[in-house]
Amino acid sequence: MAKGLNPMRLAPPMKWYKENQDRFWQGILLLAVLLNIYALVTSDLGLDTHQKMAYVEVEGGYALDWGDIRLENPNASNPDDASIISNPPLTAGYSSGTVLFSLIAISVIGYFVGMRKEFIALILIHPALIFATGRGYDEPLIALLMAFLVLLMTLSENSKNPWILKILAGLPIVGILLIKNTIPEDSLLIPTLILILAMSISCCIPNRFFQPEKMLLSGFGLGVILVLILGFIGKGTPTIIFDEPGRFLYALPFAII
């Protein structure tokens, strides 16, 4: 050690962080907001956004001029054989006002329900959210709906009639389904009723079944089962599980990490 250097005066690497945690996370939160705004201002709209904006009104609903976007059907590129949907896809994600409102509302709701600023900062600074914000995708709006769900579930804990708020908590999930799917609203009637029933019945389930570890394992397990079912019946991206299991197994560890 160099002469005259007192080791007691050497500050530990994490000393500043320990003494300034609030300032650190406030800075991360501010950085997250600035990054989202920067992405919103400078990025071009993404491919999915352009595709949603390209739907035109035809007889019987809406369709793409060039045909379908998925090529499983040999006639997918034939405009005369394009799939017709009853409603145009939601394109609120590319609106700057909608995105900014969503980001601000997420922060306000998180603060209102007592969510720590660290958690809010980590959500807003997540690269996937920043990317989606810049590309005009739906994730900021979906995150806002999930924030409302958390708010309603939190309020239900101190309510005299928690089942009412838990029923309302099912509505944001229905909204997410409507955003992510171009199916008619009436086709969601049965899933909506089942979801509302499940949310209301949850009031009668003892609290010991809602332990974080059990909820995490059951939620993860249910998600895996649903993905496997979608892959087996050939719906969307999960079909790769059975079409190309080698690629799926190769990518799975990286996805978990």
Image (cartoon, rainbow, N blue to C red):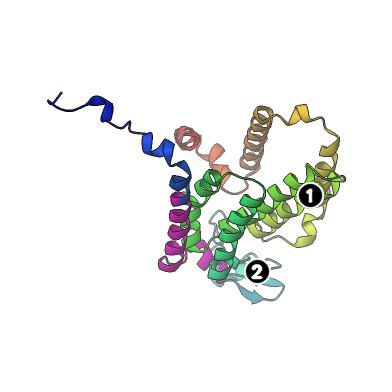
- Left/right of residue 199 with respect to residue 220 in the rendered view: right
Against 217, is 139 above or below? below
Q: Residue furthest top?
A: 1
Tag of residue 191: 1
Where in the figure is residue 51, as x and y percent of width and height? 53, 66
From the viewer's side, name the closer residue of 75 and 84.
Answer: 84
Query: What span is colored magenta in the figure?
Result: 27-54
Q: Which residue is drawn at 53% across and 42% down?
A: 240
Q: Residue at x 64, y 54 (%)?
A: 109
Q: Which of marks 2 and 1 is nearer the N terminus?
A: 2
- Left/right of residue 34 with respect to residue 65 in the rendered view: left
Figure quadrant of residue 19 = top left
Where in the figure is residue 69, as x and y percent of width and height? 54, 61
Q: How crowded is mark 1: few (under 14 residues within 10 Å), some or many (20 or more)?
A: few
Where in the figure is residue 121, as x and y percent of width and height? 51, 49
Q: State the quadrant of the N terminus.
A: top left
Q: How crowded is mark 2: few (under 14 residues within 10 Å), some or many (20 or more)?
A: some
Q: Is the magenta stretch mostly helix, strand or loop?
A: helix
Amino acid, disc 2 = Pro
Q: Which residue is drawn at 46% across and 54% down?
A: 32
Task: Let me know if residue 209 appears in the view.
Answer: yes
Against 226, is 44 above or below? below
- Left/right of residue 83 with respect to residue 25 in the rendered view: right
Q: Which residue is drawn at 73% across and 31% down?
A: 210
Task: Let me know if residue 138 appears in the view.
Answer: no
Asked if the stretch drawn in magenta spans residue 242, the answer is no
Q: Mark 2 points at which residue?
A: 88
Against 49, is 143 above or below? above
Q: How far apart are marks 2 and 1 (CA)?
A: 21 Å
Tag of residue 166: none
Amino acid, disc 1 = Pro
